Image (cartoon, rainbow, N blue to C red):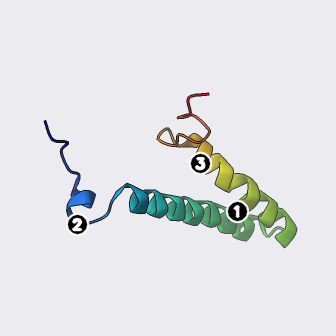
Amino acid sequence: MAKKQTWLEKIGIGNKEQAMIKSYLRAVFASAITMGIALLTDMKPEYAVLIGAIAAPLAKWADKTEKEYGRGSAD
C-alpha cells in the first residue's frame, strides 16, 4: 500500500524542505518573542540577546515532532 502524500509533497516540498521551513519559522518565532519583550519592557540590548539565545532552543525543545532533542526525542 502506497503512502498517502501530503499537500506539501504534492507541490514538490519534501521532508528536507519541510524541516528547513520549520526551522526558519521557529527562528522567526524566537526573534519575534525577543523583539516583543525588548520593545515592551525597554530593556538593554544585552538582555534581549540573552532572551533570544534562550528562546530559540526552548522553541525547538517544545516541538513534539523534533527527534534530535526535547519532547519528541527517544532519549
Of discs 2 and 1, which sits in the foreground? 2
Q: Which of the two discs, 2 and 1, labels the residue nearer the N terminus?
A: 2
For the N terminus, the quadrant is: top left
Is 33 in front, or is 71?
A: 71
Secondary-structure class at tag 2: loop
Locate residue 44 relative to residue 35 in the image: left or right: right
Q: Residue at x 58, y 42 (%)?
A: 68
Determine the secondary structure under disc 1. Answer: helix
Residue assigned mark 2: 11
Which residue is under mark 1?
A: 37
Is 16 in front, or is 65? 16
Distance CA(mark 2)–CA(mark 3):
26 Å
Give the label, 2 or 3, closer to the camera. Answer: 2
User: Quadrant location of residue 15?
Assistant: bottom left
Q: Residue furthest front?
A: 1
Amino acid carrying mark 2 in the image? Ile
- The answer to which of marks 2 and 3 sits earlier in the sequence is 2
Asked if the residues shown at circle 1 and circle 3 are in contact, with their CB atoms under 8 angstroms apart, the answer is no
Residue 13 shown left or right of residue 61 in the figure: left
The location of residue 12, given as percent across then percent down, is 26, 66
**Residue beneath the point at 74% across and 53% down:** 54
Task: Check disc 3 and report the residue beneath it.
Answer: 60
